[in-house]
């Protein structure tokens, strides 16, 4: 087999042309273009994906395939993700730290090495109890994150 | 808010009743029940999810939501995943170690902190260059993994 013509594409989805979809408060049920991303083999070291500063306690970067988004969410202790919901299925895997969720009438602390599966449209709020690295997987990708219309995060402290 | 009636469901998808779908060689294009998993909030510490021994160099466990599967694949150095393809989109994130892929006519070494997005139906082979922890995300979930019909892995050394 020929030697490594490795195609390095350290392109984050956030570099796509922005399509404005207007302000939003409720994220659930918003109609967006879900498909149509080109299926593409991409080799992406995380350290080549620019990290966005969303607020003083919250940073994030992500990789987008076709129907899967994988995000690294970096939270400082005390970071709050306000109550919100979205039509995207979410699986949260805490790599470091601890994240407390208010969800489905319960409080659940998800610690390093633990996973939470969050159904579509289930409202949730979260608070970082420690400095936390949270791996979030979405299906489909979060259009509001790609298009930077996720004001609920950018407004949070 | 009431205190933590945390519902712990350390249930792995592998405990679902097995549905035999017959032997298979090519995985791509196989028609399977893709949807219909119940959307459910699940809190799952990885250390409660049984680890399957697939072969002496390969172990695996996974968590399944509705349309997302997240798997931790534990490989010893020298572990080979034979050439195969599947209709499931895959995003591979290497947490530890290094995994060499043969894919799309190229050789790509994916190391700790690096990601590979693999389009549906793209054939790929892999070899662990070191002891490796590989986080694989699929959409939809791998029915062959859930149903334990993934003989290409169980036969590999």
Image (cartoon, coloured by chain):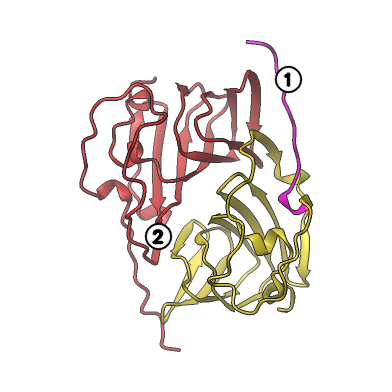
Chain colours: A yellow, B red
- Where is residue A151 drawn, in percent x and y? 71, 74
Residue at screen point 32% across, 26% down: B151
The chain identifier of the residue carrying mark 1 reads A
The chain identifier of the residue carrying mark 2 reads B
Residue A3 sits inside the magenta stretch = yes
- Where is residue A102 drawn, in percent x and y? 49, 78
Residue A5 marker: 1
Residue at screen point 40% across, 64% down: B43
- The mark closer to the camera, 2 or 1, is 1
Residue A121 sits inside the magenta stretch = no
As rendered, which of B146 and A134 lies closer to the eye?
B146
Q: Is residue A51 left or right of residue B83?
A: right
How many residues crowd mark 2 within 10 Å: few (<14), some (14–19), many (20+)?
Answer: many
Q: Which residue is mark 2?
A: B44
- Where is residue A150 drawn, in percent x and y? 69, 70
Residue at screen point 44% across, 65% down: A119
How many residues crowd mark 1 within 10 Å: few (<14), some (14–19), many (20+)?
Answer: few
Residue at screen point 75% across, 48% down: A49
Element at label 2: strand
As rendered, which of B133 and A44 lies closer to the eye?
A44
**Magenta region:** A1-14
Gap in angstroms between the C-alphas marked 2 and 1: 40 Å
- Where is residue B102 drawn, in percent x and y? 58, 21
């Amino acid at each position: 087999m020929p030697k490594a013509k490795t195609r390095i594409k350290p392109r984050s989805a956030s570099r796509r042309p922005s399509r404005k979809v207007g302000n939003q408060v409720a994220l659930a049920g918003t109609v967006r273009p879900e498909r149509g991303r080109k299926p593409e083999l991409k080799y992406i070291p995380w350290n080549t994906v620019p990290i966005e500063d969303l607020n003083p306690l919250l940073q994030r970067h992500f990789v987008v395939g076709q129907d899967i988004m994988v995000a690294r969410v970096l939270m400082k202790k005390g970071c709050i993700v306000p109550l919100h919901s979205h039509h995207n299925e979410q699986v949260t895997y805490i790599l470091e730290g601890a994240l407390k969720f208010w969800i489905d009438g319960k409080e659940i602390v998800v610690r390093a090495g633990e996973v939470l599966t969050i159904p579509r449209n289930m409202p949730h709020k979260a608070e970082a109890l420690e400095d936390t690295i949270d791996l979030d997987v979405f299906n489909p990708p979060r259009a509001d994150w790609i298009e930077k219309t996720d004001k609920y995060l950018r407004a949070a402290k």
